[in-house]
Image (tube, grey):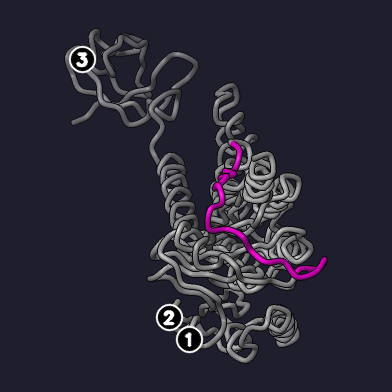
Amino acid sequence: MLATIAVLLLISSALCSGSEVYVGEVNGMIDPVVSQYVSGVINQAENANASAVVLVIDTPGGLDKSMRSIIKTVLASRVPVVGYVYPRGARAASAGSFILLATQIAAMSPGTNLGAAHPVRMSLTGETTVENKITQDAAAYMRAIAQLNGRNVSLAESFVLKSRSITEKEALKDGVINVVAGNIGELLNKINGKTVKLESGNVTLETSHANIVRVPMSTSENFLHSISNPNIAYLLFIAGIFGIIFELSSPGAIFPGVVGVICLLIALWSFQTISINYAGLILILFGIFLFLLEIKINSFGLLSIGGVISLVLGSLMLINVNKEPFISISYWSIGSVTLITALFFTFVIAKTAAAMIKKPETGKEGMLGLIGETKTELSLEGLVFIHGELWKARTEKEKVERGRKVKVVGMENLTLIVKEVK
């Protein structure tokens, strides 16, 4: 009896040991926040002696530095890492395809795709390939990852060299991934019993009855992840500049200035994580300066045209493609910012020009040419009714009788010089 109980306890202990699978999510752009988050998920799994970590992937790509950091963490993990492109309609594109192929088990859900990992840069004519050395470096990195996990090297390399993208069925058939599964439960059942090679040695997966422990991003991580997007950072930067311009043009408004400074600080933090080209940043600032200068100096639109060109070029150059070959600012963001900026300053310039040519309505200049009526006889001096008010007036030579129409031709101190309208 005691022997039976002891055997049951040993079996129970064996089943419970390492019976957890930690699940993290890699959504959106790959950035330093995602890299830190993935590292945290894997550390928690290692400390809990978990059976495996599942990284649920749905990403268009991201920062090269962050991608490589995640891959180093995955390859050094003491716990098997499973990359899983999920749900239906998800993708592991660009930097995401590198991460998926780096995991010990690569899996995809039906209706997903991976690939399209060719480095690009934005230009006035569209996306163009970057320098050949960057492309070759990315291709070599992809080959190394594929070889390490026994995947189809030539197909993996074509993701970089030919921007090829494939479905989950093609990936499974051609030996790029290990499993196609409709959900995490099915995935864990299919990979159960598979042996994977870690840095520390071979490990056999025991995942069929594992408890799933989900590790979501914290609130602060979600916020920082959102603002690390280059499009968001770019828009915040422009919004910050406008906020400060409004504050300087209307001192004491406070709100635009506060919002502008906050937006600028957040944008500058994001630029630190993204790795920007400072020549592009200077061109953007120069473009805004040209728009402001147009308000002060009427160049008949020449400065505004220069501002638009400078703003567009700076926006295209903002991301340092030599350090971050897998990301860029979208044309929609650049086009929207340029259009709104141009329309705004066109409106301001038009209003300023109209104010400059408008006839003055007050002071001496505002009185000249006004028509009024004499309320007394004008010889040396008298009274006229002009613009709803009684004014002292005199004529230059002729005498004007009461009730006649007169026109203001001059002014001395507060006395109008008038002339009869005949």
Of circles 1 and 3, the one toward us is: 1
Magenta region: 198-218
* Residue located beneath label 1 in the image: 173
User: Relative to the observer, which residue lies in front, 201 or 315?
Assistant: 201
Residue 341, relative to residue 216: is it above or below? Answer: below
Residue 66, relative to residue 42: is it above or below? Answer: below
User: Relative to the observer, which residue lies in front, 197 or 251?
Assistant: 197
Q: Residue at x 60, y 31 (%)?
A: 257
* Residue located beneath label 2 in the image: 169
Marks 2,3: beta carbons within 8 A:
no
Residue farthest along the front direction in this orientation: 1
Whether residue 61 is in magenta: the answer is no
In primary-sequence order, the first of circles 2 and 3 is 2
Q: Residues within 10 Å of mark 3 (few under 14, many from 20)?
A: some
Query: Looking at numbered disc 3 in the image, what kind of residue is underneath it?
Result: Glu
Query: Looking at numbered disc 1 in the image, what kind of residue is underneath it?
Result: Lys
Marks 2,1: beta carbons within 8 A:
yes
Q: Can you tell which quarter of the image residue 280 is in?
A: bottom right
Inter-mark Cα distance, 1 to 3: 108 Å
Whether residue 205 is in magenta: the answer is yes
Picture coordinates of residue 365, whole percent (x, y): 43, 30
**Quadrant where the image shows the C terminus:** top left
In primary-sequence order, the first of circles 1 and 3 is 1
Residue 296, relative to residue 376: is it above or below? Answer: below
Picture coordinates of residue 370, whole percent (x, y): 30, 27
User: Relative to the observer, which residue lies in front, 1 or 33?
Assistant: 1
* Residue located beneath label 3 in the image: 401
| Secondary structure type for disc 2 | helix
Inter-mark Cα distance, 2 to 1: 6 Å
Residue farthest along the bottom direction in this orientation: 154
Q: Can you tell which quarter of the image residue 354 is in?
A: top left
